[in-house]
Each structure stands twice: as structure tokens, then as C-alpha cells.
Amino acid sequence: MIDDREIIEFTAPDEAAGKRLDAFAAEASSFSRNSIQRLIENGDLLLNGREAASKTKVRAGDVITIVPPPPAMTDIVPQDIPLDIVYQDDDIAVINKPKGMVVHPAAGNPDGTLVNAIMYHVKDLSGVGGEMRPGIVHRIDRMTSGLLVIAKNDRAHAFLSDQLKTHSVSRVYYALCDGNFREDGGTVDAPIARSRNDRKKMAVDPAGRNAVTHWRVLERFGDVTFLRLELETGRTHQIRVHMSHIKHPIVGDEVYGRARNKLGIVGQALHAGELRLIHPSTGELMTFTAPLPEEFENALAKLRKASMPRF
């Protein structure tokens, strides 16, 4: 059982051989084909313990494992929660999400989320993401701050989703990472999948989906380094997993690194500071920025002061 969810597992019979994975899994379970495809996309449906594409052909004896999503919640209530709206027009809204805010309601977080806030402050949200995620095109983690774009109609949602798939949207993050980087910049090219040991975590896995993160050193402070990171792909927890993989976890990351740190930062020191996209109606290339949050700036000030030469 994971998060109070029962794992569903079944074996493909002889007559299933040759069928597409999504088609067979839908036939053999209570999920619709669209739901199965979303489970596959999120890494919540495994074929013989590994992630696979929807179009993969099933063989007799294959074992399909499904981790169902949490039970759907209804009646999402708009809430007058302060929201930093960086930009808004008839198609999109760009939000600077504060650290600690969950993007959408889920088990354990029924309200107080970004979705509750945008339903109050932003009108006419797209319905592509379903009733639990109106307007939500992409997400950032609860303890990560920064920019994300909201779609205000279905056409804009589809356009922005296509940009994410083709990597036309550029997302730049800033992070404080443990350790001293020898090079001034580099790329982590390592596939990511849901961890086989802990389903709440992601991990670098040769059987996972392609994941690429570009990084550049901005400042060095001995045992901590200030980085600029740009996503080429957008996998769950990608930056956090990649930095941990190269032995430089993000400061304060209690899942992939160490929660305790000398800077007093709670949660990962990771901020989505720049977002570039093509507007769905005008075709204009737009760039949005969000300053580092106060906690992050204070940590940098402390590091800079400690690294100043003493005479």
C-alpha cells in the first residue's frame, strides 16, 4: 500500500500477446484508456517492474503493476489566498509561487493550494487538466518557489503543453548546492524513473525517461555553490535528482540530500527564476523573471560575508 492506495498487479494471459500496453491495461482494469495513459506518463504503471511507453506490445506472462492515483476530491473552493501574479491576459497567467504552497489539491492537502488561489484571483481557467488541476500546465514542488504558467482556456493549454513537449518553453532555476564544483558548467544527462525502492521518490534509472539538466556556476563558497540551472526536459524532481546523482544535492533537500544545513534553510534552496515561452495567440517570445525569495537572498548574504577575506 502506498499513500493508502492499493497496488494493482496482474499478469498478461496468452490472448493479450501483441496488444498495446495501454489498451490491455484498460481492458484488464477499471481505468479508462486515457487514465491508463496518464498513469504511464507519470510512471505509475510499470511493465515487469519498469516504465514503458503506451504503445509497447504486451507479451504473455508480462506483469503489469499499477499504483492508482489518490481518490478524487470534489468541490474545490476558491480561496482568497495572496497570489503574486507576474503577468495576465486573456490566454495565460504567470504566477510566482511561494515556497511551501502545494500546486493542486491532493490527499493530505485538500485546500490552501495554488489551484484554490487561482480559482479566486484568475477567471476562466482551462479544463484540460481536469477538475483537480484547472489551468495547470506544469508544476513545481511544494518547497520550490518561483514561476509557472497557467492556461486560461483549452486552446492556450494545448499550445503550451506542446511547447513543453518540444522543449520550446525555457525554464531557468537557481539553487544552492552542497560541495564545490570543479568545472564552471556542465550537463547532467541521466534518465529518471520512479524509484524501485521508494515509490515516493524518483531516481536515475537506465530504464527511465530521458532527462537533461544544464548547469553553470554563479558563485563558489567552498562547501556550497550557487548555480544557474536550465531544464532541457521536465521530469518530476529532475533538478533535485540530478544534483543528488552527481553528489551535489540541493541545500535543505530532505528527500534527496540533507535537511540540516548551516544556512537555516527549510526545504530545498531551489527557485524557478526565469520562464520563457511563446504566447499562444500572438506568437511573441515572452520572458518572465522572479527575484530570489528573501530566505534565499539572506542565505547568499551570509555565505558572501563568511567568504570575505579578513585583513
Image: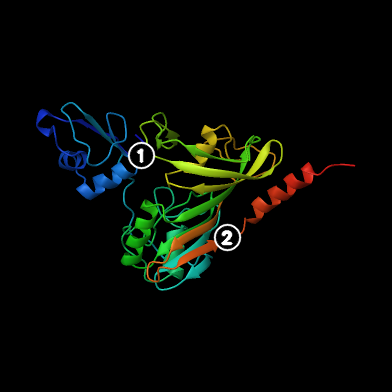
Describe residue 256's horizontal placement relative to residue 17 as left or right: right
Q: Quadrant of residue 45?
A: top left
* Contact flag, marks 1 and 2 (Cβ < 8 Å): no
Horizontal and vertical percent position of residue 57: 19, 35
| Amino acid beneath label 2 | Ala
Horizontal and vertical percent position of residue 9: 24, 32
Residue 295 visible here? yes
Q: Is mark 2 on a helix, strand or loop?
A: loop
Compare residues 250 and 207 and report the one nearer the observer.
207
Of marks 1 and 2, the one in the foreground: 2
In this rendering, is residue 42 above or below 282?
above
Compare residues 181 and 103 and report the one nearer the observer.
181
Numbered badge on residue 166: none
The C terminus sits in image quarter: top right
Q: Name the residue under label 1.
A: 4
In this rendering, is residue 78 above or below 193?
below
Describe residue 130's horizontal placement relative to residue 110 as left or right: left
Q: Quadrant of residue 137?
A: bottom left
Q: Mark 2 points at which residue?
A: 290
Of callouts 1 and 2, the N-terminal one: 1
Q: Is mark 1 on a helix, strand or loop?
A: loop
* Disc 1 to disc 2, C-alpha distance: 37 Å
Horizontal and vertical percent position of residue 299: 69, 48
Q: Which residue is drawn at 65% across and 41% down?
A: 225
Horizontal and vertical percent position of residue 295: 65, 52
